[in-house]
Amino acid sequence: MQIIRKSIIWALLFFTVFTIPVVPESGVAHAASVAVTAPSAVLIDPVNNRLLYAKTPHRKRPPASTTKILTAMVAMDMLSLNKVVTVPDYAESIEPSKIFVRGGEQYYVRDLIRATLIKSANDAAEVLAYAAAGSRSAFAEKMNKKARSIGARHSHFVNPHGLPDDRQYSTAYDLALIMDEAQKYPFLVSTLKSKTTMIYSRSGRKIYLKNHNKMLWRDSREIIGKTGWTRKARHCFVGQIRVYDKKVLVAMMGSLSLWRDLKILADYQFGLAISKIRSNRKLWGRHETKKIQSALKRTGFYSGDLDGQFGPETVRAIEQYQAANDLKVDGVVGKITYKKLMQQGAHTESKSEQIQRALQRAGLDPGPVDGYLGPQTTRAIRAFQKRKGLTQDGIVGPATWKSLQSYL
């Protein structure tokens, strides 16, 4: 019977992964080729709120313990982290997961928040709600008010922990908005990064906490967040994925294979960016990287800043350039890619680079010819303007540009 049961589960998992379509919704970005088992999922760029991936993002579903991100924020809005609170007797009867608080015990708020987010302790969440608002229902009102204030308008909460209740629901999109708001709470974010920690009651009882987020151990990328699970909700997750200086918000509800789905979404957004970024950083310094970015921009493959840093955006531009020029598509600027890129880029020199080259030919030092009109180039422009009797404002207006063109 056990073998038959496992066979049925795997058959259902296979069917779900390969046959559930991504249903289009108006105004939402889609990635139909991304086969996650979660019926609802989103990836959002927090810089511009752009949807990078969406699968029924506004479908209302039970949020399970992802609720606790909102609980932690509301608790921190209302209570000092250093406040000591007393456990009400009824909190002992809350269902697991829990830290088994005892009526009359006292804890610092910061430790109850750690237990809520790391251990996903339902009893700790209940104690926070009682300490902050005096009752579960009063705290739920605060939660709903907070959710509405950040735009999570398709959610409703009646308890602080996410235990089953038909009146409690959210959406993948709303959960991502809640996680975005959580960035304003540094203690909350740092707590989500903790793999393990120890907390103590005021009487000295020691409680070990281990994070439910297995991606902290399984993936080299920074994937932090809050898990959730009930029979009805299945596996849920809300958090963020960071690779170097780039991050995206992620939310999933109803997953049958949470860690697999998270890896799929992380790979979809960042691919093998970490290894490619490391390879490029070993090959090229900041000055050379700026030249590469400038050439990519001139050839139309890069629209980011000329910051001299290899990040996911630069790697993606390299891959696109390699594909368009029949080169090996590995995202790494080797000798062949570099030579071809510099040759092509030289034929489409930008006006900024022409300014720098003209200043060089005028005997001044604008720094590297990379199209970046930084402080060194600006000083050279002022020196050129002084030499020519022009207004020394460091800006290449019509008169300055006309004088510079004689050196090209």
Image (cartoon, rainbow, N blue to C red):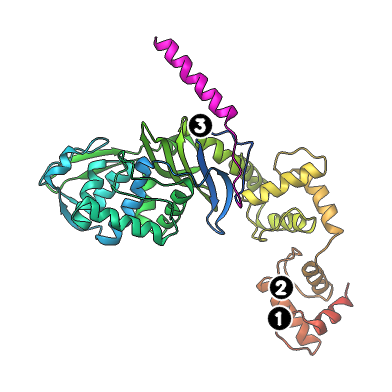
Disc 3 packing (10 Å; few <14; some 14–19; many ≥20): some
Quadrant containing the N terminus in the rendered view? top left
Residue 370 image offset from top left, x and y in percent: 74, 63
Q: Which residue is mark 3?
A: 260
Is label 2 or label 1 in front?
1
Up-down relation of residue 394 to residue 152 (above or below)? below
- Magenta stretch containing residue 11, yes or no? yes
Disc 2 packing (10 Å; few <14; some 14–19; many ≥20): many
Verify CB contact (< 8 Å) between mark 2 and mark 1: no
Q: Which residue is mark 2?
A: 377
Q: Which residue is mark 1?
A: 394
Q: Which residues are magenta?
A: 1-27
Tell whether 196 sits left or right of 310. left
Residue lying furthest front: 167
Residue that appears at 70% across and 84% down: 393
Up-down relation of residue 288 to residue 201 (above or below)? below
Residue 380 image offset from top left, x and y in percent: 73, 77
Residue that appears at 53% across and 36% down: 263
Tell whether 251 sits left or right of 274. left
What is the three-letter code of the residue carrying label 2?
Thr
SS type, badge 2 = helix
What is the three-letter code of the residue carrying label 3?
Arg
What is the three-letter code of the residue carrying label 1?
Gly
Rounded to the nearest angstrom, the CA distance separating label 3 from label 1 is 54 Å
